[in-house]
Image: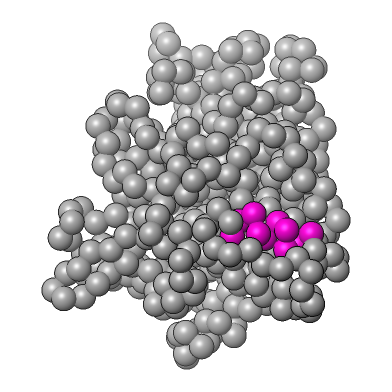
Amino acid sequence: MKKIFYFFKFVSVVSFIAFVSCEKFIEIDNPIDQLTTDEVFSDSSTVESAILGLYVQQITSGTSGFLNGSVTLYPGLSSDEIYNTSASASFDPFLNNDLSSTTTLSWTNPYNIIYSCNIILEKLESSPLSSSYKERARAEVLFIRALNYFYLVNFYGAVPLSLTSDYRVTSTLARSSEQEVYNQIIADLRAAQNNIGSTNESTTLRVNKWGISALLARFYLYTKQYELAKIEATKVISSGNYLLPDLSNVFLSSSKEAILQFVPPNTQIFGVADAYRFIPSSATARPNFALTESLINSLESGDGRKSKWLNQNTVAGKVYIYPYKYKTRSVVVGAAKPEFNIVLRLAEMYLIRAEASANLGNNSDAISDLNVIRKRALLSELDKNQSISKEDLITIINHENRIEFFAEWGHRWLDLKRTGQVDLVLTNLKGDKWQKTDAVYPVPLSDIRQNPNLTQNEGYN
């Protein structure tokens, strides 16, 4: 009996899927076309398949994977973007900020991916492959681990910091502080940045040095390291690799704005999970989720995003306006997909740099970057020389973030929290349904019962 990695063909390549739990690999005899872990990490082609498998793991849970549907829908419901219109009450706890500790998906899925990352990192250490190749491979895996920890810490606050595949260690981990998790994220991203080299520069389907800079820019903004945020955002903007296309072309698979994209599995009838979630099944059907009046009313008159990124159905006399960034709800299994899931895109770099500049007192630069986004949205440009306070300018930038990134990767939820606006905004919207402790999600009770060192977030049982 040997511990193995499973492989299967997916999107014209052999993609690695480690069937893992937090405990161990499944142990069975080796089928003919499967490889032992030693064989995998002795050949660069199978290491590449292993790394590709990490990308596949992000998006293999239908429309409910952590970074494939859930990361947009759940925070959108929790904040002031989306409401549930369907008869199903399964999403109401997110909408009403009344979650129970039986909710597990946004916890289990990323930890499985992190576990796979840790395995690959450990196996690379003892691999006979060249040091230069191993460092480049390690860089890509570190980015994926950092990306998952970024969302975990922003959803849950303090979380267990698993850096090994050893179950004897991971099964009893206590929660590390948010600062400790952030320290690990930055360590992973800096190591990745130092070693990625020119790897993957010609593709947006795997991370390259610009993708690492993009996530670093966001990280530095969140941690108020504004000079560093500007530096990393500028690297991406100045690279010349990415453009701001017409609003109709932003979310296409061929998007010139995409810095990193995830490819939906070609074995399913839907493309990007967000499209399948939000677009109604027909022109006369009620969408399962609609945009809030608060969001709709915040769009300026003449904003091109209103006509390009919103759509509506009228059902029983009521108008439902829903997100329409992705426009292809269903696809033919096996056919080329017109849209990929955009993880990172150029517009964020302009708004990160604008916010960083405003916080550093450089209003003119901030407004210049803000105007790039407004111009693309067909809005009038703001006067760079106007007299405006830092606070007022940041409010304008936050508003632009809300409109540009609505129903997209939880941006609004995370922005409300990092800017200290979450209690004010959601108390006004939801009244006594909102409690301060709702700003983080509950740790799954099933994990707490298995791990005596794991504690629950305040406000949850």
Q: Nearer the viewer, residue 82 or 21?
A: 82
For residue 74, side relative to residue 182 (left or right): left
User: Residue 213 sits in which quadrant?
Assistant: top right
Instruction: State how the image is colored.
Output: one colour
In the image, residue 339 sits, relative to residue 130, either above or below, namely below
Q: Is residue 161 visible?
A: no
For residue 197, side relative to residue 300 (left or right): right
Residue in the image at 85% along x and 68% along y: 361
User: Residue 425 sits in which quadrant?
Assistant: bottom right
For residue 60, side relative to residue 284 (left or right): right
Residue in the image at 42% along x and 11% along y: 33
The location of residue 36, given as percent across then percent down, is 54, 16
The location of residue 159, given as percent across then percent down, is 65, 59
Residue in the image at 58% along x and 44% along y: 244
In the image, residue 7 sits, relative to residue 208, either above or below, namely above
User: Residue 311 sits in which quadrant?
Assistant: bottom left
Label the magenta part by its dominant secondary structure.
helix
Q: Nearer the viewer, residue 176 or 382?
A: 382
Q: Is residue 72 visible?
A: yes
Check residue 203 for magenta coloring: no
Q: Which residues are magenta?
A: 365-374
In the image, residue 87 sits, relative to residue 136, either above or below, namely below
The location of residue 270, given as percent across then percent down, is 30, 41
The location of residue 429, given as percent across then percent down, is 47, 84
Number of on-image labels: 0
Residue in the image at 44% along x and 39% along y: 252
